[in-house]
Amino acid sequence: MKFHYFLSIIVCLILGACNSSQREALPGEVTVSGVVENPTSNAPIILERLGASGIERIDTTEVDGDKFTFFVKEDAQAFYRINLYDKQYVTFILAGTDNVINITADGSKATGDFSISGSAINDQKDQIDQVEKDFSEKAMSLEQKFLDARENNNPEEMEKLRLEYFSAQKNKNDQMKEAIWKATPNLSAIYGLNYLDATAEFSFMDSVASEFKSSGKLLDYAQSIISRVEKMRRLAIGSPAPEIELPSPSGELIALSSLRGKYVLIDFWAAWCRPCRMENPNVKKMYAAYADKGFEILGVSLDRTRAAWMQAIEKDDLPWKHVSDLKYFNSEAAEMYEIEAIPATYLVDPEGKIIAKGLRGPSLRAKLKEIFG
């Protein structure tokens, strides 16, 4: 009986007469079974493995009605994704011990809903995704309300919404870190770290990296996190702030070192960044309160055009020093300071050492009050 079973598999492979749904998983294989709610006729679905060194195409199939099946041999944790017509990508994790993974996906757009079941590690990933999704929906609502309040010249409502945004963000970060720590040292933890601001959460990332190093697990994937943490140590609290020397709006070169003797807030922002623009009124208050006491701000714009940069400075009425090379995230300063998301801030003391990072809203107010009284 076994001979006839394996013979039928060989015939299917040679003649292409059987599709994947017409056989069962071989020993050691994981069945990845899916349903596409909006299938595209005669268009391939691609299974890809996301390795530490790049993306590898594993298999291709077409939907049978609205269903598809892949068989994967994987004996360790690894990232995979289903590429649905180059319209939607569904990332999942194989744990090395799974038997069946079930996927339901929209298939028609990048933001389409999807679900994954059959693996505890994917359940961890889903929890992480849900935390980010809940915050994104909350943030979009608050940002729109903030824009409406600014349009209606309602500063009290703007302040209320700004504080609500920071509270929601802190709550998200706390939930995200809790979910990531529970997942460590699994791949779902590495996945979740992508949702955190590496600069603001350096200590947490350092702890996660240490757990992977001590466990010896998944080092091919974790090595990028470990290397990144080591690289970021040069931006740790107490380290000398790397030099910044970029053009001002007038074209004059301004160097961070020229501001020695003052406490300097390096503020990475951009005209297109809504959270940055929401924070600007608070930063203005802090500047007005402490500029005469030795507080300076160096605004580093990650804009692409001078027109957008100038318009934002004028509209938000930002009176401090500004510089930019107008290279977006390829900015020399952004690369030096490992900026991957904005707003981002570094506070530098009069000797040029980093004394705080990620200060915004209440945390910025508290720190400056601590310094200046």
Image (tube, rainbow, N blue to C red):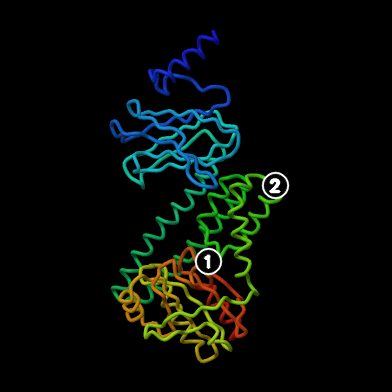
Which label sits in the foreground, 2 or 1?
1
Q: Can residue 278 be seen from the camera position used here?
A: no
Which of the numbered marks, if any, corresponds to residue 338?
Answer: 1
Which residue reaches farthest right?
Answer: 214
> Percent position (x, y) of residue 153?
31, 77
Q: Which residue is drawn at 33% across and 44% down?
A: 109
Q: What residue type is labelled 2?
A: Ser
Q: Residue at x 43, y 38 (%)?
A: 82
**What is the crowding at mark 2: few (fewer than 14 residues within 10 Å), some, or many (at least 20)?**
few
Tell me which corner region of the image, top left, top right, bottom left or bottom right, holds residue 322: bottom left
> Percent position (x, y) of residue 337?
53, 70
Q: Can residue 38 be seen from the camera position used here?
A: yes
> Percent position (x, y) of residue 170?
52, 62
Q: Please indicate whether residue 12 sits to the left or right of residue 373 in the image.
A: left
Q: What residue type is labelled 1?
A: Glu
Q: Which residue is drawn at 33% across and 64% down?
A: 144
Using the image as rendered, state which of residue 182 and residue 43 is in the foreground. Answer: 43
Instruction: Label 2: state its secondary structure.
Output: helix
Instruction: Label 1: state its secondary structure.
Output: loop
- How many numbered badges does the structure rendering display? 2
Quadrant holding the C terminus: bottom right
Q: Please indicate whether residue 47 sits to the left or right of residue 311 in the image.
A: right
Which residue reaches farthest top?
Answer: 1
Which residue reaches farthest bottom?
Answer: 292
Quadrant holding the N terminus: top right
Measured along the vertical axis of the image, is residue 363 above or below residue 195?
Answer: below
Cα separation between marks 2 and 1 = 27 Å
> Percent position (x, y) of residue 175?
55, 54
Using the image as rendered, state which of residue 356 and residue 2 is in the foreground. Answer: 2
Residue at label 2?
A: 215
Q: Please indicate whether residue 312 sits to the left or right of residue 279 in the image.
A: left
Which of the numbered marks, if any, corresponds to residue 248?
Answer: none
